[in-house]
Amino acid sequence: MSAKEIAAFSVPELSTLPDDVRERIEQVQEKAGFVPTVFLLLARRPAEFRAFFDYHDALMLRENEQLSKAEREMIVVVTSAANDCHYCVIAHGAILRIYAKDPLIADQLAINYRKAEISERQRCMLDFAVKVAVDSQSVEQQDRDVLKAAGFSDESIWDIANIAAFFALSNRMASVADLVPNAEFYGMGR
């Protein structure tokens, strides 16, 4: 894909990137078999690339007994759908299908998570995440109490909020950049 096909903003050539940024992109390419376009777009500013992916990893890869990797991706897919972020729904939908081992779940969540085949606990989690992503100023103690009643700890509630907020930022930047999802994402986990 050329830079014009990836996004509305220029993307750098891999050979021009700092070693650590280029190596991270090459590791992802080796694991996935392709370079997700978000890596190329964000690499245009190496300091922001590092900060973005460090924060991403802190949220999405840290150990949490109450939130599985699939549930974290559920949060991303649902909040990205609420924010109309084409890139994130497609890319994280692919990751969700793989983690959940379910070829249908991402589509169900992206269209209407309230009708998806998920647990009541997950529905509470997603209700809160969407509120954080699109109406955070209206979050109240009652919202946290609902999550606590569903079995979530304060740390997990913090994680849900952080994931929703971080991807609200990501959604907005992907949309502003007209970031195009890689074709490979569409068939993953199906």
Image: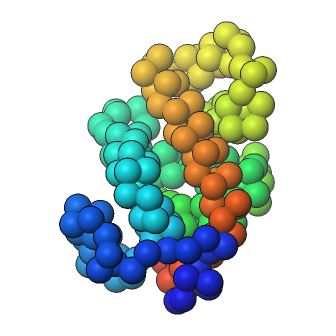
Picture residue at 34% right of the left edge, 46% below the top: 54
Which is more toward the observer, 122 or 179? 179
Q: Judge whether 64 appears above or below 73 on screen.
A: above
Q: Judge whether 163 appears above or below 9 on screen.
A: above
Q: In x, y percent, where is residue 107? A: 67, 65
Picture residue at 78% right of the left edge, 20% below the top: 138
Q: In x, y percent, where is residue 96? A: 50, 60
Q: Give the side of residue 140 with respect to residue 90, left or right.
A: right
Q: In x, y percent, where is residue 55? A: 40, 42
* Residue 174 placement: quadrant: bottom right
Q: Residue furthest front?
A: 16
Q: Residue furthest top?
A: 141
The scheme the figure's colours follow is rainbow
Q: In x, y percent, where is residue 26? A: 27, 74
Picture residue at 38% right of the left edge, 51% below the top: 47
Which is more toward the observer, 6 or 146? 6
Which is more toward the observer, 55 or 5? 5
Q: Judge whether 3 appears above or below 55 on screen.
A: below
* Residue 140 placement: quadrant: top right
Note whether residue 143 is visible. yes
Q: Residue furthest bottom?
A: 1
Note whether residue 181 is visible. no
Number of numbered discs visible in the structure rendering? 0
Picture residue at 41% right of the left edge, 32% below the top: 66
